Image (tube, rainbow, N blue to C red):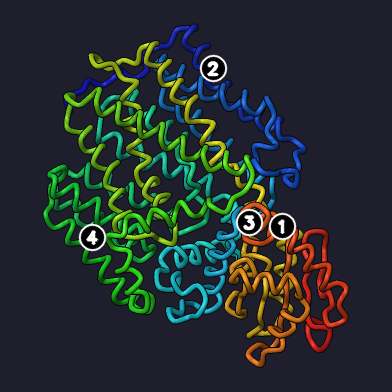
Amino acid sequence: MGETRVPAAPSGTATAGQRWMNLVFVLIPLLCVGLWTASLWGADPRQMRSLGLLDLLTPASYVALGLLILSFLAALYRERSDAILWLHLIGYVGIIHATAPILYGTVRYAWSYKHVGIVDYIIRHSGVNPQIAIGEIYHNWPGFFAGSAFLTELAGTQNALIFASWSPFFFNLLNLLMIRFVFRRLTINRAQIWLGMLFFLLINWVGQDYFSPQALCFVLYIGLLGIMLYSTVQRRMIWPFTIVAAAIAVSHQITPLMMVIAVAGLVVLRRVRGWYLPLIAVGLTAAWALTGGLDYTLPNAEDLVSEMGNVINNTEQTLDKSSGLSGAASMQVVWGGRITVAISVLVALLGIWRHRRTGKTFITAALLMILPGVLVVTTGFGGEVLFRAFLFATPFIAYLAAGVCLPRKGSRLTLKRTAAAGTIALLVLPGFLLGYFGKESENYFTNNEVAASEWVYTHAADDSLLAEGSSNYPGRFVDYEKFTYVPLSREPEDSIQEFVDDPVAKLASWFNSPRYKEGYFLVTRSQEVAAERDGSLPPGSLEQIVNKLRASDQFRIVYENPDAVVFALAQGQGS
């Protein structure tokens, strides 16, 4: 590949000094995890405000995180063993991705609960319903959910919430394994492999690691690239490539598109051999979209075609997601992520420039960094396309950024280059923390909120209407198909104002509709937090609505706890 391998940790009998040094490098990550844990001991997630989890962090928290990164860089510079480097990265993953399940005691992020609801449906019905009215896209691409249902039943439980809490931790470990798999084909330089893995963890702030098809398909996508790059005998590649590509094709909507773009790009530009690989990728993607996913593909074909080539609109869909945010702290969160993107991409471009003559693998990595940009030309993906494009590019941005820290001549990581790596880490870490943790005040749900949802699901009749302050709460994870859902925050502005002015009359007209057997109005703590943060409802409107319903004799409270309240009509339901 035009590069020389950095020597592994010295073999043979270690001296007493080396043994002590190894012990120090083992103890430091354990100390950092302990210090981080102690810094958050007794912290109350309810106290999170506009900066999310960062509101709970203490100086000791930042010391633990900084010391862990510095220790990793020192261990890499001193050429410690892979086991020691793994210990550091696993410690980092634990700090960042195990904090929420331990501190919250509930699953974070509202979409996790909705995905658990699909698993619950598959377990109860032993299959999917591609024509279902709610959540049809998941029933048309059910691979992730079917696999999760199988694992849930295999574990002897009916509730996938048990797995969902820890998904970010496990998916990020799998990400590291797959990324190392790819990097080891791109280079034999040990320092670049490990620095790239660290930088990936430091820049991947977009949060697509929760219990979701995207989290699984990202792992599969990186693994698929590794299969292509590693396979020297093409016939041996076909079956593993086809199996992984098929799993992607039946599990997600945008990852198969990214797969087709990447596979075609690598083959056409002669980064890998195998003229038939793009045909397999396209064939599997199209075959599923036109068979298993046809009930979604056909009705939405016009929208899908309209987004093709509409770069400005596709980009604006993502940027508009932050347009409604208010307050300096909220904008800090938005710009934190953006600045991390800008810095990491600039450093990656510098890495390409510095090593433009050192071998073809830098060209391959640069190609895999750039190709996700094609997604913006093809789809808006519900306002998520820029986030997803960056996600698919992050491993290769990280790899190329690591190249900045390598000397032009030789391959040993020098003290100067180690300092450069530390500087890069220092520059991107604040933006990562803001982007990844800054919205935790609305991603955190209490046990009381979960209990309120469970009450509704176990007491409401089929074909009920569930009106919600917003969809940001732990909902739709049990018997989700029973309801028609109406989040107030997604109503037209004039309808929202009418509801706020006279919620009693408006809600009564909804609930008295002959289309619904019963009606419930659910307001939770997290709904109020989200509405206040994103400006989807007038300030304080949910509190006003709740107070007016409390005072009305047309409605009664059928369930209440400190974090949630459920209203129903005063006559004939919710007993």
Asked whether the residues under the numbered discs 4 and 3 touch, taking CB atoms below 8 Å apart as contact, a structural biologist would say: no
Nearest the viewer among 346 and 506 is 506
Is residue 243 shown to the viewer in this render?
A: no
Marks 2 and 4, how far apart in space? 48 Å
Residue 295 picture location, percent across and down: 37, 79
The residue carrying mark 1 is 539
Classed neighbour count for the residue bearing mark 3: other residues with Cα under 10 Å, few (<14), some (14–19), many (≥20) = some
Residue 477 picture location, percent across and down: 61, 68
**Three-letter code for the amino acid on which mark 2 is drawn:** Leu
Marks 4 and 1, how far apart in space? 48 Å
The mark closer to the camera, 1 or 2, is 1
Q: Compare marks 2 and 4 and give the one earlier in the sequence.
A: 2
Task: Determine which quarter of the picture holds residue 395.
Answer: top left
Which mark is on residue 535? 3
**Three-letter code for the amino acid on which mark 3 is drawn:** Gly
> Is 120 situated above or below 258?
below
The mark closer to the camera, 3 or 2, is 3
> Residue at left 60%, top 47%?
439
> Residue at left 30%, top 35%?
183
Q: Compare marks 4 and 3 and give the one earlier in the sequence.
A: 4
Q: Secondary structure at mark 4?
A: helix
The mark closer to the camera, 2 or 4, is 4
Classed neighbour count for the residue bearing mark 4: other residues with Cα under 10 Å, few (<14), some (14–19), many (≥20) = many
Q: Compare marks 3 and 2 and give the one earlier in the sequence.
A: 2
**Three-letter code for the amino acid on which mark 4 is drawn:** Ala
